[in-house]
Image: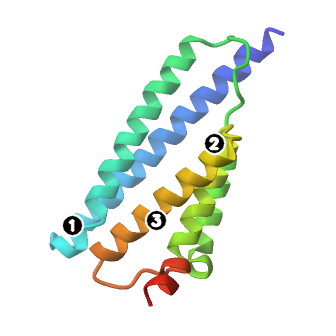
């Protein structure tokens, strides 16, 4: 029984390492984009996404550090780093076929499911609304057409 807290501790540390690697890659990509061109159209997506990812990594970092202090509490869920990484890879690879709107909806629903959400109203409501807002935002902000599946049919 004493092995379980050590295993949970290792999972949390692995989560923190993944967050650090993700934040580092995003920062390096942003720096590389800024070196390539400081034109607003080049950075219109890179800078906001960098800021969002860093804020999310920071929030998750604090949550994981807090949970590291509570190691051994009953009901501690297993780490979801690998399933989420797999979901994200499937999301990115499926965008050309599913479109940004449908792919984002499916990714968010699956992400929430992996993290324990089982209420269908929340799964569908959050996934649909967030995917719609995000898809509309990027389709209006980017100077080139986004690959859409459902919103493309609705607007065209």
Above or below, comparing residue 52 to residue 141 in the picture:
above
Q: Earlier in the sequence, mark 3 or mark 1?
A: 1
x and y percent of residue 79 in the render? 67, 34
Cα distance between the residues tagged 3 and 2: 26 Å
Label 3 vs label 2, nearer the camera: 3
Label 1 crowd (10 A; few <14 / some 14-19 / many >=20): few
x and y percent of residue 37 in the render? 19, 73
Q: In the rendered image, which residue does mark 1 sit on?
A: 35
> Does residue 57 appear left or right of residue 100 in this picture?
left
Circles 3 and 1: CB atoms closer than 8 Å: no
Label 3 crowd (10 A; few <14 / some 14-19 / many >=20): some
Circle 1: element type? helix
Can residue 85 be seen at all in this image of the molecule? no
Circles 3 and 2: CB atoms closer than 8 Å: no
Above or below, comparing residue 30 to residue 115 in the picture:
below
**Quadrant of the snapshot with the C terminus:** bottom left
> Does residue 58 appear left or right of residue 142 in this picture?
right
Identify the residue shown where x is 60% and y is 45%: 122
x and y percent of residue 107 in the render? 60, 59
Q: In the rendered image, which residue does mark 2 sit on?
A: 81
**Quadrant of the snapshot with the N terminus:** top right
Q: In the rendered image, which residue does mark 3 sit on?
A: 132
Which quadrant of the view contains residue 10? Answer: top right
Identify the residue shown where x is 65% and y is 39%: 115
Cα distance between the residues tagged 3 and 1: 32 Å
Label 2 crowd (10 A; few <14 / some 14-19 / many >=20): some
x and y percent of residue 126 in the render? 53, 51
Colour scheme employed for the rendering of this structure: rainbow
Label 3 vs label 1, nearer the camera: 3
Q: Earlier in the sequence, mark 2 or mark 1?
A: 1
Depth order, front residue of 100/33? 100
């Amino acid at each position: 029984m004493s092995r379980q807290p050590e295993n949970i501790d290792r999972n949390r540390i692995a989560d923190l390492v993944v967050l650090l690697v993700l934040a580092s890659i995003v920062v390096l990509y942003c720096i590389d984009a800024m070196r390539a061109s400081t034109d607003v159209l080049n950075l219109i997506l890179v800078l906001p996404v960098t800021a969002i990812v860093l804020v999310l990594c920071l929030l998750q970092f604090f949550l994981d550090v807090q949970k590291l202090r509570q190691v051994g509490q009953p009901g501690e869920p297993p780490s979801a780093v690998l399933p989420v990484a797999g979901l994200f890879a499937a999301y990115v690879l499926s965008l050309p076929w599913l479109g940004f709107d449908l792919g984002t909806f499916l990714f968010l629903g699956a992400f929430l499911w992996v993290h324990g959400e089982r209420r269908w109203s929340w799964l569908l409501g959050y996934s649909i609304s967030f995917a719609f807002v995000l898809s509309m935002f990027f389709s209006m902000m980017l100077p080139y057409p986004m690959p859409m599946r459902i919103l493309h049919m609705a607007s065209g």
